[in-house]
Amino acid sequence: MRGLGELEAAVMDVLWHAGEPLRVRQVLERLDTGKDLAYTTVMTVMDNLHRKNWLTRERDGKAYLYAATVTRAEAAANAVREVLSASGDPRAALLHFAQTASEEESDLLRKALRRKASKK
Amino acid sequence: MTVALALLAGAALVGWLAPRRLVRLADPVVALVAWLVSVVAVVATAAGAMFLLVVPDHGLGVVAAFHHCWNALQHGTTPAIEAVSGATGVALLTALLVRVAVVGRRTARQRAQEGRRHMDVLRVAARREAGPHPTLWLEHDRPLAFSLAGKPGVVVATDGLHRHLTPAQVEAVLTHERAHLDGRHHLLVTIGDVVAATLPFLPLFKRAAIAVREFVEMAADTAAVRAHGAETVRVALLRVAGHGAPGPALAMSRDAVETRLARLQQRQSTPSTMRRLLSCGLAGATAMVLPAAAAAGALTALMLVVCP
């Protein structure tokens, strides 16, 4: 299962790198995972990605042309937003380096620190 | 009956007063150990008290040397009262422990699910940097870092860290997050949350969630300071926490950040592994026997008063 997950990341990598819609065959040719992959494996992975809304596809002759639905930066921004919205959740499974303070609060924070430092 | 009551009183006393002492411990790892062991000790001592109520003969055995005194103290109470209150206590305690177990299981499962959901997105969206704890890099301008428990646990960081922090500061942030994974801090936080949610009485239980969260942050800070120096960690913390985006949901643990910054400013030295191990063992042992010791103290005092 973890192997498939890594393959998903590798396939998205190829499509984000290409910047244009690709067929399964083209993705297979560009995949650099160090092992020989079967055409059907890659097809399954891309089908999964399509099901999970990472890819859109359009029929082009006999095969599908796949394209990423979002750019890598958009995907990262979505992930960050999702994680941050969950971090106040009692079900949250993560530990933050520092929960973000609002602009006003961090301003106060810095001022308070300067005062503390100068008192010493 | 008296021994049982003394044990209950000892447990309550520790549950009431221990947090004040615990938050003043200098080493957050020692504080973590002491706090969690205290929780176990208070529950175990209360359970011991119930046991003595139900099986009073064992109680007699414990204080055989003070047999006369025991009789004097026991004067006036009938075994029936003991049995009834003991049975009630056992039932109450069992119900509470079952609740802890049920809520604990549910919470752990929910968090694991939530973690897998995050991982599903992150695995695709991020670039993976291999290691004992893989780092997942997100192409995002805001400097952010967090850790997700799992098999293996991962550190998630944004490229924004590199843009807003020096390389040494970035390393300090990553060391902090890896310390969370190495110390199994996600598990400890979950335990603290469950204790606070299911045993909402006595400060030792009620404040467990917040205390554990603060202690694990400080423990991870200590690890980062040992590798990169206090000033580096302090500035990194300031830059990450201060990089605010407006949003009411996010402005939460300012206090913890402030406490951490204050601690980083006055930190002198970090203890060696050996010394820390020793302090942890000592703190754990003390915390374990403290409720019983308090009970013994109360009982002795009572005996001195009643039978001089």
Image (cartoon, rainbow, N blue to C red):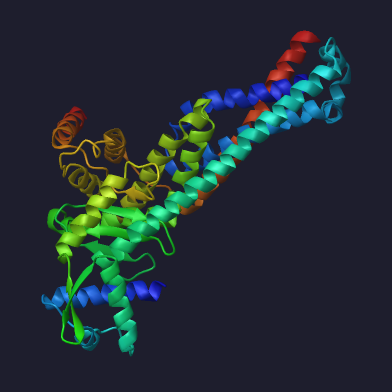
Residue A91 relative to residue B58: left or right? left
What residue is shown at x 26% (from left), y 43% (from top)? Answer: A99
Closer to the camera in the image, A112 or A19:
A19
> Is B7 situated above or below A87?
above
List x then y, in percent, for residue A98: 27, 45
What residue is shown at x 73% (from left), y 14% (from top)? Answer: B302
Give the quadrant of residue B175. Answer: bottom left
> Is A114 situated above or below A36?
above
Q: Residue furthest left?
A: A20
Give the quadrant of residue B300. Answer: top right
Q: Which quadrant of the rendered structure holds the N terminus of chain B?
A: top right
Closer to the camera in the image, B189 or B197:
B197
List x then y, in percent, for residue B169: 22, 54
What residue is shown at x 29% (from left), y 81% (from top)? Answer: A43
Closer to the camera in the image, B123 or B61:
B123
What residue is shown at x 76% (from left), y 25% (from top)? Answer: B86
List x then y, in percent, for residue B114: 39, 53
> Is B114 situated above or below B258?
below
